Image: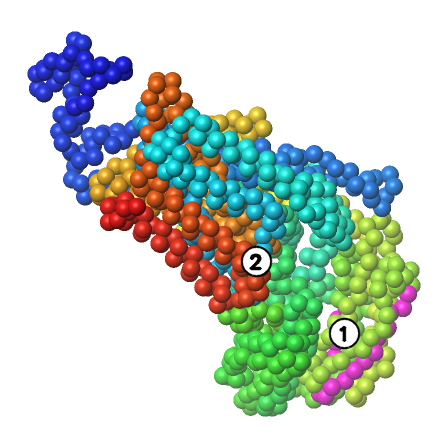
């Protein structure tokens, strides 16, 4: 046992009983005597809590590994709360007034006070890197201001994993045919340069200037590079230097990064919020759009509105990281979750009958083929400029039982330049397959510019008297994701086929003499029926006639022609109703049928009146919708406002959203339940502007990080792994895993690559400047005051830093090459399949090279 006083002199030592030592009349026992030679029994700062070092090495190694993994989940959960506090702090806004069309009412928008670059490199970087930074600080302090291997190794290993693996995952995760570019390339250039300079500087002070020693000025320079990085990144964001942009980006940032020509549209899209509430006009327009799809309740519309609002907003990397952590722990999701009713494709044979006021059934399929829709765009709206739209020509038809085989037209509209396929199948009604008709389950393919296909249907004549029966034809999208691209279903995706005993052309008329519609209905659907026969193709003209309602003011009228193909018995006239949102008396107009062809005749009801009623309860409905939408938006916030909501989320799987909870959510919630309950006691971010939560959660992260350091050190010791190897593998992976999932989600969902890989270089720089600069500065000052030197052995750390620096330059060069050359799609992420896959594999190989060579050097296979 080495003995010595602080002034370097040797004390008077006497040997006491039982291998003890007596120094200045005090009895001391050596560590070897205390732990009786048990392996790794003295490695921890806080651990072990009990005398587990008497157990077998295998059991101890297993328990420490499980404990390490479990603590990684715990630190991820408290980091979630920590980032909620950061989100609260950085979300402070100020009002900006803009001119508008209304002279007495300026346009008001709210913009964040915090600069994106400053927020990303300070609080948000600290939030994502707090475990690594605190581990390095705690290790130095616990080692009596002597350098350790675990903290620095974790920082370098985490940087390697972030740059190589996360970048590779983001490159490979972009959907086929898409790409993502870094938008703020100037800020990325600053952080990329600093990420290289940071590690080259470490190499210089460890190997060149003062080998194996860190002096005060070196540590101070390392730490001061942090504010320098923030300042330069902020200047690059504001474009204070360099080549001016074609547009004044600094002013655009002040107004929310609007692009030229997009300001009006952006304001309209973003002005759902006004002073923390939904904008009334925006919600009215949204409701009118959604209500075009029957079967959606007000609750459904409110969920869709909240989903649209949340996903249309720009999000920080922190938002995605919190979402990744909650996915890993079965917590409340930050991303909108549509209910099963809205998002799950029906696996059963499904049809929806919408009951109109006149009691007539119309076949309707509500949102049947869009199971994974995260935004309103996935709700089945007809977008002919983007997709090919496939549906039947009519919603229903009638045939004779002895017709044998007949053809049903499947029409294609909208986009015609692609090749698309859909599935057509039969569904039993009162008629059953094999008894009344032959079943169909086939795939039909439309070639480019092909607009119509036919499906052959066969009716079975059993010579038995039966009442009229019906069955259904259904169009559905194919299961293969590639086959679903560029195609969507139209509004008539299910067709009703009725077996009749009439072969006359029929009589055409309205179902009844009058229809009553609300002003907010959107489109008035007026059914026209064909009775007493359905043989042959016929047409009939229609026209609107103004009465108290005027076309162009109250509705959009005109003329048109309805075509009934052979066997079709019902068609609809759609009249757009104009909702001016002003109280007025009931108004009406008429629609007249005339000039039938094909042998058909006009029935008794050749005119019908359409009365437009004012919505007496519209304000109440709208207010309820606004409240429900606000409630859904509030449920998607990153942070909690009260202890009650915080504890409720901790107690319930998926934050209480049981309907959308999966089996995996239940398992993960069970595994992390203890951590959730403990950390639910942290003050919510609503207190003191988030700063109280910031401080308390940072302290919790520090305590948990100290335990993780002990677990990693003892585990590595038990399995004969050097601390440096444990740091760049187990600890680096455990602390970086949430960032991996967050970056992948951001890469797929964001329009640009900034939140996916743009922040990786900044985070790696901050790790060095804070994670090493701060503890080394403290330790070097301590040793300088004592007249000693702060020793930091270059050894494996210097080799690891040098290796990473070289590979870092290669990776950043590859990302820039991907941005510049068309072979990669001129984008950092995604692009053509082959270069994309090769780039991803290459970066993963760089990480493997880094880990393996660093491990071999640490274990002494070779030295440099």
**Residue at image location 85% in from the left, 48% down from the top:** 583
Q: Nearer the viewer, residue 273 or 90?
A: 90
Name the residue rendered at 40%, 47% in the picture.
Answer: 804
**Residue 771's spot in the image, x, y percent?**
43, 34
Element assignment for label 1: strand
> Which residue matches tag 1?
528
Instruction: Using the image as rendered, state which of residue 414 and residue 630 is in the foreground.
Output: 414
Figure check: 185 above or below 17: below
Where is 402 relative to 857, above or below? below
The image quarter containing residue 138 is top left
Residue indicated by mark 2: 819
Tell me if residue 199 can be seen. yes
| Cα–Cα span, label 2 and label 1 | 58 Å
Q: Please check the rendered image and state whether residue 752 is part of the magenta-colored stretch, yes or no.
A: no
Q: Secondary structure at mark 2?
A: helix
In which quadrant of the rendered view does residue 114 lie?
top right
- Residue 724 left/right relative to 277: left
Quarter of the figure with residue 821: bottom right
């Amino acid at each position: 046992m080495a003995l010595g006083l602080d002034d370097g002199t040797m004390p008077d030592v006497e040997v006491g009983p039982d291998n003890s030592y007596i120094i200045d009349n005090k009895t001391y026992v050596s560590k070897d005597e205390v732990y009786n030679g048990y392996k790794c029994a003295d490695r921890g700062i806080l651990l072990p809590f009990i005398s587990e070092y008497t157990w077998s090495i295998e059991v101890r190694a297993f328990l420490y590994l499980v404990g390490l993994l479990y603590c990684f989940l715990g630190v991820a959960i408290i980091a979630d709360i920590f980032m909620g506090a950061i989100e609260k702090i950085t979300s402070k806004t100020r009002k900006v007034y803009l001119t508008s069309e209304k002279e007495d009412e300026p346009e008001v928008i709210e913009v964040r006070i915090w600069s994106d670059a400053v927020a990303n490199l300070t609080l948000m970087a600290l939030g994502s890197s707090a475990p690594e930074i605190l581990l390095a600080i705690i290790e130095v302090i616990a080692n009596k201001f002597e350098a350790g291997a675990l903290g620095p190794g974790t920082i370098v290993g985490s940087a390697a994993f972030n740059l190589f693996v996360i970048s590779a995952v983001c490159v490979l995760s972009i959907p086929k045919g898409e790409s993502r570019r870094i938008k703020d390339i100037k800020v990325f250039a600053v952080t990329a340069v600093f990420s290289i300079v940071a590690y080259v500087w470490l190499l210089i002070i460890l190997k060149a200037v003062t080998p194996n020693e860190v002096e005060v000025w070196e540590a101070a320079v390392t730490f001061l590079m942090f504010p320098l990085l923030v300042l330069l990144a902020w200047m690059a964001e504001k474009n204070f230097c360099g080549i001016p942009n074609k547009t004044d980006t600094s002013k655009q940032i002040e107004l929310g990064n609007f692009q030229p020509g997009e300001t009006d549209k952006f304001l309209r899209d973003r002005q759902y919020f006004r002073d923390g509430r939904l904008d009334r006009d925006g919600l009215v327009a949204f409701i009118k759009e959604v209500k075009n799809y029957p079967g959606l309740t007000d609750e459904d519309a409110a969920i869709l509105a909240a989903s649209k609002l949340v996903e249309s907003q720009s999000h920080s990397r922190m938002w995605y990281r919190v979402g990744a952590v909650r996915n890993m722990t079965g917590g409340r999701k930050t991303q909108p979750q549509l209910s099963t009713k809205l998002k799950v494709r029906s696996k059963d044979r499904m049809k929806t009958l919408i009951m109109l006021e006149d009691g007539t059934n119309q076949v309707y399929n509500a949102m049947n083929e869009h199971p994974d829709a995260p935004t309103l765009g996935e709700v089945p709206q007809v977008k002919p400029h983007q997709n090919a739209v496939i549906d039947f020509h009519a919603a229903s038809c009638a045939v004779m039982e002895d017709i044998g085989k007949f053809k049903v037209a499947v029409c294609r509209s909208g986009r015609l330049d692609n090749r698309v396929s859909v599935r057509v199948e039969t569904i039993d009604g009162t008629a059953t397959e094999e008894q009344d008709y032959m079943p169909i389950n086939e795939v039909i393919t439309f070639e480019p510019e092909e607009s119509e296909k036919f499906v052959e249907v066969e009716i079975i004549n059993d010579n038995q008297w039966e009442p009229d029966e019906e069955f259904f034809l259904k169009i559905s999208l194919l299961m293969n994701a590639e086959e679903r691209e560029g195609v969507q279903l139209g509004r008539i995706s299910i067709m009703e086929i009725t077996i009749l005993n009439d072969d006359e052309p029929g009589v055409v008329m309205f179902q009844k003499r009058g229809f009553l519609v609300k002003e907010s209905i959107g489109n008035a659907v007026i059914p026209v029926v064909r009775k007493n026969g359905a043989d042959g193709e016929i047409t009939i003209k229609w026209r609107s006639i103004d009465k108290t309602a005027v076309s162009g003011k109250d509705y959009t009228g005109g003329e048109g022609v309805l075509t009934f193909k052979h066997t079709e018995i019902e068609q609809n006239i759609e009249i757009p109703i104009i909702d001016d949102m002003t109280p007025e008396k009931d108004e009406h107009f008429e629609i007249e049928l005339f000039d039938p062809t094909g042998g058909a005749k006009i029935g008794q009801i050749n005119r019908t009146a359409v009365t437009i009623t004012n919505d007496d309860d519209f304000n109440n409905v709208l207010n309820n919708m606004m409240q429900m939408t606000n409630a859904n938006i509030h449920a998607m916030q990153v942070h909690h406002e009260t202890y009650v909501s915080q504890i409720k989320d901790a107690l319930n799987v998926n934050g209480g959203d049981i309907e959308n909870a999966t089996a995996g959510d239940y398992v993960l919630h069970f595994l992390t339940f203890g951590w959730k309950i403990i950390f639910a006691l942290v003050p919510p971010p609503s207190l003191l502007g988030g700063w109280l939560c910031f401080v308390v959660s940072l302290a919790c992260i520090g305590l948990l990080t100290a335990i993780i350091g002990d677990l990693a050190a003892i585990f590595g010791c038990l399995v004969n792994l050097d601390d440096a190897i444990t740091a760049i593998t187990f600890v680096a992976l455990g602390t970086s895993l949430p960032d991996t999932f967050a970056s992948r989600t951001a890469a797929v969902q964001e329009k640009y690559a900034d939140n996916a890989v743009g922040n990786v270089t900044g985070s790696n720089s901050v790790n060095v400047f804070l994670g090493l600069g701060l503890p080394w500065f403290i330790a070097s000052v301590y040793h300088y005051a004592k007249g000693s030197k702060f020793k930091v052995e270059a050894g494996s750390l210097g080799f690891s830093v040098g290796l990473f620096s070289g590979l870092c330059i290669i990776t950043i060069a590859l990302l820039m090459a991907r941005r510049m050359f068309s072979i990669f799609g001129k984008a950092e992420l995604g692009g053509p399949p082959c270069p994309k896959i090769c780039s991803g594999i290459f970066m993963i190989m760089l990480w493997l090279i880094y880990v393996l060579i660093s491990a071999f050097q640490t274990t002494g296979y070779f030295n440099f």
